């Protein structure tokens, strides 16, 4: 099985996480809070 490489960039600030997943091609901003991070990781 070959797993393709995929890059995800995350810019961290006190209030927000700016996330760019090259597989999706769409930037996303979420709150830098436990609940928001848990939801995006799931």
Image (tube, rainbow, N blue to C red):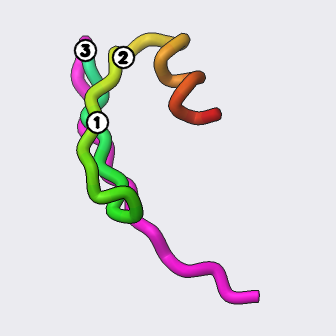
Q: Which mark is residue 32?
A: 2
Q: Is 20 left, or right, of 2 in this rendering?
A: left
Label located before the other in sequence (2 or 3):
3
Tell me which segment is drawn in magenta.
1-15
Please tell me whether residue 23 belongs to the stretch shown in magenta.
no
Q: Is 25 left, or right, of 35 in this rendering?
A: left
Crowdedness of circle 2 by 10 Å Cα count: few (<14), some, many (20+)?
Answer: some
Instruction: Determine the residue positioned at 50% across, 23% down.
Output: 37
Crowdedness of circle 1 by 10 Å Cα count: few (<14), some, many (20+)?
Answer: few
Marks 2,3: beta carbons within 8 A: yes
**Position of the N terminus by quadrant:** bottom right
Name the front one of labels 2 and 3.
Answer: 2
Q: Name the residue under label 3.
A: 14
Element type at mark 1: strand
The residues tagged by marks 2 and 3 sit, at their Cα atoms, a distance apart of 7 Å
In the picture, residue 16 is in which quadrant?
A: top left
Residue 5 versus residue 12 in the image, above or below: below
Q: Which mark is residue 28?
A: 1
> Where's residue 12, x and y in %?
27, 30
Name the front one of labels 1 and 2.
Answer: 1
> Where's residue 28, x and y in %?
28, 36
């Amino acid at each position: 099985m070959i797993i393709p490489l995929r890059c995800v960039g995350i810019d961290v600030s006190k209030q927000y996480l700016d996330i760019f997943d090259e597989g999706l091609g769409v930037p996303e901003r979420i709150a830098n809070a436990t609940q928001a991070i848990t939801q995006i990781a799931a």
